Image (tube, grey):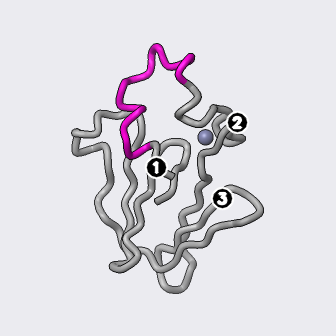
Amino acid sequence: MLESCHSTWIFDATRMRFRRILKGLDLDAPSASTAWRPYFGLELDDSSESFVVFLNPEGSRLLRSWRHVEHCPQCGGEAPQSSASMNCAAPRTAEAPAAQIR
Ligand SMILES: [Zn+2]
């Protein structure tokens, strides 16, 4: 499972499929997560926080995203656990348990 700035990525390695759960929405809403989609490879970049998901066997269709980290360069935000002081207007679902597992 990976955390990016706007969603949580869940990978089912045995069935080679993945889905994304969008952050900041009511987790009970059907629109909060995507359907399972097949993938053909996952590549993590050790030197940066980026990762690539291969959507076809040839590797010509890719999804690239970035893991959300503390002092995140992608969104400028803090990690979810440390942003409580700025959270007064944020929905409570930003602290859903799934978002805190890394
Ligand atoms: Zn971020």
Range shown magenta: 84-99
3 and 2 marks in contact (CB < 8 Å): no
Amino acid found under the numbered disc labelled 2: His
Q: Is mark 1 within 8 Å of ligand 1?
A: no
In the picture of the structure, the residue carrying the numbered disc 3 is 50
Q: Residue at x 55, y 69 (%)?
A: 62
Q: Residues within 10 Å of mark 3 (few under 14, many from 20)?
A: some
**How far apart, in angstroms, are the residues tagged by discs 3 and 1?**
18 Å
In the picture of the structure, the residue carrying the numbered disc 1 is 101
- Name, please, the residue furthest toward the top: 88
Ligand 1 is found in the corner quadrant, namely top right
Q: Residue at x 53, y 69 (%)?
A: 53
Amino acid found under the numbered disc labelled 3: Ser
Query: Looking at the image, is mark 2 or mark 1 earlier in the sequence?
Result: 2
Q: Residues within 10 Å of mark 2 (few under 14, many from 20)?
A: few
Residue 93's spot in the image, x, y percent? 35, 31
Q: Give the total of numbered labels.
A: 3
Residue 15's spot in the image, x, y percent? 33, 79
Question: 23 above or below 40?
Answer: above
In the picture of the structure, the residue carrying the numbered disc 2 is 71
Residue 92's spot in the image, x, y percent? 36, 25
Q: Is residue 87 magenta?
A: yes
Amino acid found under the numbered disc labelled 1: Ile
Picture quadrant where residue 20 is located: bottom left
Nearer the camera: disc 3 or disc 2: 2
Seen in the image, is 22 located left or right of residue 78?
A: left
Q: Report helix, strand or loop for mark 2.
A: loop
Query: Looking at the image, is mark 3 or mark 2 earlier in the sequence?
Result: 3
- Name, please, the residue furthest toward the bottom: 58
Q: Report helix, strand or loop for mark 1.
A: loop
